[in-house]
Image (cartoon, rainbow, N blue to C red):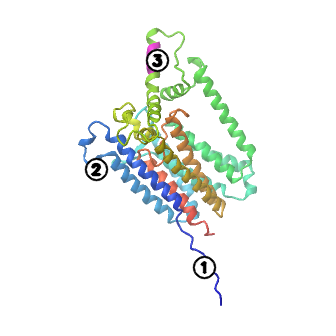
Amino acid sequence: MILPPLKPRESAIDWPLALAVMGLLAVGAVFVASATLAREGAADLPWYRLDHFRQLVWYGVGLGGAVAVCLVDYRVMARWAMVGYWVSVALLVAVLFVGTSHGWGARRWLDLGPIQFQPSEISKLALLLALANYLSRPEPELRQSRVFLTALGLTLLPFLLILKEPDLGSALVFLPVGLVMMFVAGVPGRYLWRVLGGAGAVVVLLLVDILLAPPQWQLKLEPYQRRRLQVYFGVASVPPSATEAERQRALKEYRDAAHNVAQAMISVGSGGLTGKGWRRGTQNALGYLPRAVAHNDFIFSVIAEESGFVGSMTVLALYTVVFFSGVRIAGQARDRLGRLIAVGVVALLFCHVFINIGMNIRLTPVTGIPLPLLSYGGTSVMCSLIAAGLLQNVYRYRNHY
């Protein structure tokens, strides 16, 4: 008797995704070390107080969270998605009353003594799971306006709470992620076009406010938000009736606000083909790229200066592997829930990568959004790794139905 050939056993791990994530972690650890060791007095600190060591600790915690997420079928997690969503909303409300500020007067962190964390990062994952669970319903129901309005409400609630902190950059991520998930789920296009039309009107209003409106008609933006937008559009707001002293003060505030972007672009452009070498980037080592932001918001500039075009393209190639792996996993999912989780993770990571790298090369305004897996920061790193764990989860349980 001739036996049929055995089918090769399918791996429970998507190796291209896993290797790309580990590659990004390695790059992040190396260049966070470069950005933080350049600080004055860093050589005198004990090893356990160095920022790159803390980053490694958060990598370890995040990887543990990713593994834990992989062990539970995403369908089981989806049953608790709304509970997680409302817990995250409660944390966002708590930030408005008892949150702490690390600058600009914005309340974005909850302080629990030995640790601090950003609920806005947690709420991105909570929304992703809640929206995927809500939209994984029969297609006829998705055509009802009630379902669309509920999904839009789930997206706008954390958006408005984070906008209140204020944290415009993190808030803006929610809208594209929510709309992409609704589109993939099958929500009628006419509903989505109305939202996009409304968003477009708000953008036009902002442009008029920044570029043309007199001071008495301007919107009530935070001063630092207005300065960032003015820097992006290259407009220094000086009222016609301003005195010479007021004019000089306004121009100085504009130059100060533009400093980070200018130095980041110099860093990216000066790296050449292969860079200046690890810890040899002059913009970083000499402090021209401000050390307060070099290891988080502008980590890509450090990478570009020290590893050049080759290093920058390596980072982009690793992210491309992550994105296409996520799209492939979404295509292999056997149910709408798994597909929506995978699409939501890809949309979330892509928004972060596009906005962060864009602000390093003045393609987008400075918003303070971290670069996933590379920027220094505990909550961001852990949530990015858990998001990657969700992709692995959908891949692992793709045939369990």
Rendered location of residue 157, percent (x, y): 58, 43
Which residue is located at x 65 percent, y 46 percent? 179
Local secondary structure at mark 3: helix
Residue in view at x 51 percent, y 45 percent: 313
Q: 111 or 288, which is in the foreground?
A: 288
N-terminal of the pair, mark 2 or mark 3, is 2
Is 334 located above or below residue 272 in the figure? below
- Residue identified by numbered label 2: 48
Is residue 252 located in the magenta-colored stretch of the structure?
yes
Q: How many marks?
A: 3
Where is 70 relative to 319, above or below?
Answer: below
> Which residue in the structure is indicated by mark 3?
251
Q: CA distance from mark 2 to mark 3?
A: 42 Å
Q: Quadrant of residue 44?
A: top left
Asked if the residues shown at circle 2 and circle 1 are in contact, with their CB atoms under 8 angstroms apart, the answer is: no
Task: Please tell me whether mark 1 sits on a helix, a strand or a loop.
Answer: loop
Amino acid type shown at disc 2: Tyr
Q: Distance from label 2 to label 1 (Cα)?
A: 51 Å
The dominant secondary structure in magenta is helix
Mark 1 burial class by Cα count in 10 Å: few <14, some 14-19, many 20+: few
Q: Position of residue 119 (x, y in %)?
A: 47, 46
User: Which residue is denoted by mark 1 in the rendering?
Assistant: 6
Which quarter of the image is occupied by the C terminus? bottom right
Quarter of the image with the N terminus in it: bottom right
User: Which residue ends up furthest to the bottom in the rendered image?
Assistant: 1
Q: Quadrant of residue 245?
A: top left
> Does the magenta run of residues contain 221?
no
- Is label 2 in a helix, a strand or a loop? helix
Q: For label 2, count other residues whose C-alpha is less than 10 Å away and answer few (under 14), some (14-19) or many (20+).
A: few
Q: Earlier in the sequence, mark 2 or mark 1?
A: 1
Magenta range: 247-253
Q: Are marks 2 and 3 in contact (CB under 8 Å)?
A: no
